[in-house]
Amino acid sequence: MDTICVKILGVACLIGQVGLACAQAGAENIDELIAGQVGDEAAVTLDFVEQAEQLEQLLRKPIDLNSGTEKDFAALFFLNPYQQSMLLAHRQQSGPFQSVLELQAIPGFNLETVERMMSYVYVGRTSDLTFQSLPAVRSWRGSWMSTYGRPFQLQRGYRIADSDRSRYLGTADRLVNRFRLHYLQTLSMHLNMKKDAGEPYFSDRQQYGFDHYSGSIQIRDQFGLDKVILGDYQLQFGQGLVMWNGGIFGKGAAAAQVMQQAGGLRPHTGLMETGFQRGIAAEYSMRHFRITPFASINRLSSTGKMNRGMEVVTSINNSGLHRTPTELRNRKNLSQYVYGANLTYQKSNFAIGGTYVITQFNRYLKLNNQAYSRYRFEGQVLQNMGLHYQYTWRNLLFFGESALSFPGGMAHNHGILAGLGPKLSASFSYRDYQRNYRHFFARSFQDQSTLGNERGIHFTLVYHPTRKLEWASSVDHMAFPWLKFRTREPSRALQVQSQWSYIWYKKGHLRLRYQYRYFQENYPAVLNVQEGIADVARQQLRLQFQYAVHPRWQIGNAVEGKLFQKTGHGEDIGFMILQDLAWKDLPKSVSGNLRLAYFRIDSYEARIFTFERDVLYGFGFPSFYRHGFRFYMNQKIKLAKGLDAWARYAHTTYFGEEKIGSGLTEIRGNQRSDFKIQVRYSW
């Protein structure tokens, strides 16, 4: 009886807050949703296409709150593990959901979280309160999408005609084709074809057209297996200390970022040309056990040299760019063999698992050719094994993983997420990645681009004084026992971050974010200091406002300042202000957005990153420095049933500059502009 009263009271209170606004709830802009999770500059180079496609599939087939599993809710990456745990606990203790609005009665769920979930979850066949209607299920569905882009100003690499000099061998055109085909929930196929700007197309060593082809076939619930994938796939286990393919969101202002949410086995559908597996993998469940064996053969681009009469690999190129004669000569000249398995036991609120991976190469690797890289891998065979766990007890979620590389050292990442009441949550984690822990696929909560040579303690506190207000702050203290790139001695770092948010339900938000980062690196080269390291501090302050002034019109404003200070260098200041305008249904088949931005930034060290809207799946996080003006405009038109088109134009003017960039990327003049067009047909 008490449970029923709580549910009725919770829903009744919420109806007064949201009213008929739920009737207007639609799909939140997926690219903005993903951008909101990127909290650190180190994450801007990652590919989030997989996450975007996963959300788009959930728009067609949302998750039933009463039958969804932990793995289903993990696809909603904007939910942190604590929120997922509380959702499942609420369902277990209080019984089936009666309405999506009931989510607001769960600890850790505020208005913005529920608003985000509206388009991706439902109760039963439909939710009367949210007026959610599910699309009819079709046996076969698919899509074909083509994206073309080109800059207006050519870089120096395209203007060189001398065949004996380094130059771009292809045109400045960028072309991407994507094909998707699904049969119910049983079969899915995908194919990507990509040509980067500067890469040859049906010429030189690209006789088959595109520089990069990627594809896979996934079969679910057949042959006694949960799933099997042939082709390109990703693996994510534990906290990522042994195996993690795909993107990881950086150090955001929320407690969600400290714990990785492993997706297990899934197709690789993004455009990243490295960091995935190519071969066969399967997933099989028996009672509380799940085993995932895998085998992969991939071809990597590498650079080598002769060492004691033997040719060794000294570096691996993960950029995916093959534009110049040298890049083409080194293209896919290294074979990588990967095989292993993950075994996980899960029952109720406890899970434990182990991962074992062998990585083998057809040539000898010697990647420790610098003082700071002394402990990196050398040889042809590397073994990694790790043990990961997760346990929920009341309002506490414990997680962690320990891993060992052979040859090499160990890595540890352990932490706890805690609900300290309906308005307060916290997280604490400790990591120790030894300098000689060697790997090729590890990616976890880390400060550096490569996992290793790092110890850290991280603490986050999130406070919801009301459903509309949120305050999230974090502190991360790090030590680096060995040398780093641009740091000749062991060093330390500190990062402090705090963000206040005010949310208007279905209207917009106001956010104020401050970040302080202290670290150490070598003195400026002009000082010719050969001993000791300098202290460096970066401070950033960002004020962001977004509001729907009309169902068809939305405005956005942001102001950001950055202060860079370094011993022996002085101070550099960066400032940026921008204005956004977005529209939809003008008429009903037309939507778009534009931005005007002004920036004045003293140096590259004080550069400012910002999220930009783009064509579908075209995530942009460019950085800006110097002094200039930025403009871009996106337009989407629904041409016919199942046929959509996007167009984008962007232009940047740098005041007082005679050239932009250097080397092969140099552009004459002070302007840079480009355009994109995209067409998608869905059936």
Image: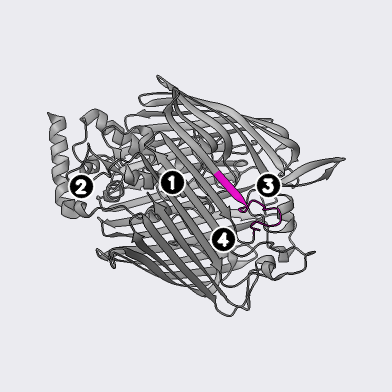
Residue located at (69% from left, 71% from top): 159
Label disc, if present, on residue 51 of the rendered structure = 1
Residue farthest to the bottom, as pictured: 656
Circle 1: element type:
helix
Residue type at numbered disc 1: Gln
Residue farthest to the top, as pictured: 287
Q: Nearer the viewer, mark 2 or mark 4?
A: 4
Q: Which residues are magenta?
A: 199-214
Label disc, if present, on residue 174 of the rendered structure = 4
Residue type at numbered disc 4: Arg
Q: How far apart, in angstroms, are the residues tagged by discs 3 and 1? A: 35 Å
How would you rate the neighbour count of disc 4 (Cα within 10 Å): few for under 14, some for 14-19, many for 20 or more? Answer: some
Residue located at (21% from left, 44% from top): 101
The residue that mark 2 highlights is 130
Circle 2: element type:
loop
Q: Are marks 3 and 4 in contact (CB under 8 Å)?
A: no
The front one of 625 and 644 is: 644
The picture places residue 33, in percent across and down from the top left corner, at 38, 52
Residue located at (14% from left, 50% from top): 16
Circle 4: element type:
strand
The picture places residue 472, in percent across and down from the top left corner, at 37, 50
The residue that mark 3 highlights is 483
How would you rate the neighbour count of disc 3 (Cα within 10 Å): few for under 14, some for 14-19, many for 20 or more? Answer: some
Residue located at (13% from left, 40% from top): 9
Q: Main secondary structure of the magenta part?
A: loop
